[in-house]
Amino acid sequence: MIVGSAGHPYWQCLVLCDALLSLPNVHVADICGIQQGHDSNEKLIQKEARTAGTPTSLTPNPSEIAKPLLPGFFPGDIPPINIAKLLVKERSLSNPLLPTAVKVTGSLGSLEKKTKKLVTTHLLPLGVDRKAYVDSLPWQSSSDGKRLSVKLIFGRALFQRLGKSQWDAILECLESGQVVEVIAQTRVIDRESLCKWVENRCLELEVREFRILTLDQSSDGNDDVPAQLRTDTAQMPFKHKPKSEWTTPQFAPITMEDIFGASNRIEFVNSTESIQSFVTATAGSISSPAEPSSDDHRSSFPASHLVGIDCEWQPNQLSARGEKQPVLLLQISMHTLQKVYLFDLQTMLRPLLPPDESMNEMESYVSQALLKLFRSKKIIKVGYQASSDLMRVAASYPHLPCFQEVPSVLEVDSFVKRTLQIKKQKKSRAITMSLAKLTAHYLQKSISKECQVSNWSARPLGQNQLEYAAIDAAIGPVLVENAMESINATMVNVTSNEISPKVERWEGDDGMSKVICNWRFTHFQCGGGRSEHEKYKLDKLKAGQVFGGDSSWTVSQNWIVGKPEPPVPSLLSSS
Ligand SMILES: *[C@@H]1O[C@H](CO)[C@@H](O)[C@H](O)[C@H]1NC(C)=O
Ligand SMILES: *[C@@H]1O[C@H](CO)[C@@H](O)[C@H](O)[C@H]1NC(C)=O
Ligand SMILES: *[C@@H]1O[C@H](CO)[C@@H](O)[C@H](O)[C@H]1NC(C)=O
Ligand SMILES: *[C@@H]1O[C@H](CO)[C@@H](O)[C@H](O)[C@H]1NC(C)=O
């Protein structure tokens, strides 16, 4: 621990702050003022405030050294002043600055309510006389040693995340003088904000999260502290402990019960008997119009003919390098039945055979059972990045016809992105980045990822693996329904088996026409001795190798529903 003056410009230290801070395990602690008479401090502060912006003298007046002023060190990066100046002057320049995050503890100045969704306040370091610091620069940068003031913006980002009721509750408990710990971002992308930085050394921070701290009465141990330092321990940051939670709610993990109202909704399919019971149970919803059961509150969802799809394979971490990892488990969530069927492909099918291999008895049984569902236009196959999962299943079992052509596929991520665009919501990429982010956004729940890297070839699978697998498939339709609801969209043409449904916000709406696609996967087996012609054709067809290697090639085609089907690819010569 370096006590006191390391890097402090008044002490002419030989070690620069930046050099110190680049060392491992060196952190900037909050430094509180040593209260040795307010009068002299105040003068100094006023002087500092006036001279802020000019380089700090390296040969200060000896009397100033004798009475060092230790303001709160600002623990974050400050925007580079030269670039900021340029950007303010030359508005046409594109802004290269990126926001940086900072975690800082301080006490709130007076709150200024600008609008219902915007509150600003100054943040003061602990240990300063609040009155003395009004309109001055109470912080000191640990980067350039100069003074600055810090303004907190509780704005739209926080409002949107918290929702109105939580926001109101938080405003209720915020008050001037309160000690808070804040995680915030610099607003360097905002020119007005940069302007304040350049002209007044006022650093605006957009609050992402904060919590209120309270004085920790239980901790003492002041005995070693010299008497003159003991005057105001209430202002020491380490004397505080959290009083409130962080504003970001830690979402509870989602369960099958949250989705379907009951937990016993998982069926494991690994034998002719269990396939038969899948066929019997699903026959109705596959061939006839979806009639949601009336006894459940969720049946009011507009799109109960959605079927959630997901699959699992051995994670790279658990497999030898370069080994092909076929899909071992295929999850099918029948939303109308409120059931998830886990197809144990590892047990029932032989993976990675050539496309012209004939199926054994079990394989034809599986293929027949799934064909109706997968080939149905009416039933929309929904999943997070569904097409890449479907391609992997198809390439894992090229000799099973059921997987090779899949009409009416809806990708949750692209669909949600489209709805967010329609709603002009920013940050749509952050929201759709993962299934977990989507779940947090729409359902305020988290998805446990702990099973993702688990041994999916172990049998029997563990209870939490089954639950994880089921949830990943079941959640897709729920998210899609939420996204549809948010833009008042409905599915039309959902009763005929001959045409695919369409998402519409009003009659004849074409803005969502691209969200449902048909997919077809065609596989080619070409050994190392490929002819020039084959190479040329594979290239032309944009064939890819799902598992790497050199001999199995897959061409994936997709076309928007209602559009003409492209020709089946072939390696044979054609004009
Ligand atoms: C996964 O489980 C199977 C069956 O229990 C076992 O043979 C295999 O070694 C396991 N793999 C890993 C990487 O633990
Ligand atoms: C099918 O799965 C059940 C439940 O995990 C298990 O008890 C049974 O042995 C499995 N059957 C086959 C043929 O693997
Ligand atoms: C959806 O409909 C409701 C009620 O008709 C309306 O208040 C709302 O603004 C609509 N939302 C969108 C995104 O069109
Ligand atoms: C259903 O599809 C048919 C044929 O594509 C079309 O003429 C009809 O307008 C559609 N119905 C609705 C409600 O969109």
Image (cartoon, grey):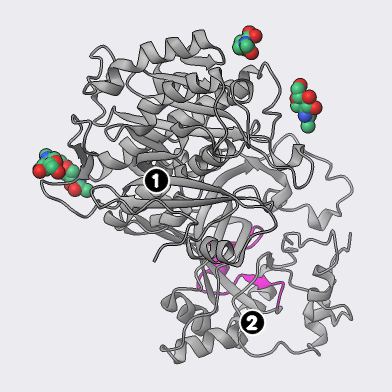
Image coordinates of residue 544 in percent, x first then y, are 56, 55
Residue 48 — which label? Answer: 2
Of tags 2 and 1, the one toward the viewer is 1
Coordinates of residue 80 in the picture (x, y in percent): 61, 81
Residue 509 image point, x, y percent? 15, 51
Mark 2: is the Cβ under 8 angstroms from ligand 3? no
Q: Are marks 2 and 1 in contact (CB under 8 Å)?
A: no
Q: Which residues are magenta?
A: 122-143
* Residue at image point 63% right, 25% down: 346
SS class, disc 1: strand
Which circle marks residue 519 in the picture?
A: 1
Q: Taking 476 as reference, is 259 above or below it? A: above
Q: Residue at x 43, y 14 (%)?
A: 278
Separation of marks 2 and 1 at Cα, in angstroms: 68 Å
**The N terminus: image quadrant:** bottom right
> Residue, x 52% and y 11% (percent of image)?
272
Looking at marks 2 and 1 on the same chain, the residue that comes earlier in the sequence is marked by 2
246 in relation to 8, above or below: above
Q: Amino acid at mark 1?
A: Trp
Comparing 479 with 473, the one in front is 473
Residue 537 visible in the shown view: yes
- Which residue is at the front of the view, 475 or 203? 475
Specify few, some or many for label 2: CA neighbours under 10 Å numbering under 14, 14-19, or 20 or more. Answer: some
Q: Quadrant of residue 447?
A: top right
Instruction: Tell which of 530 and 437 is nearer to you.
Output: 530
In the image, residue 265 above or below residue 322: above
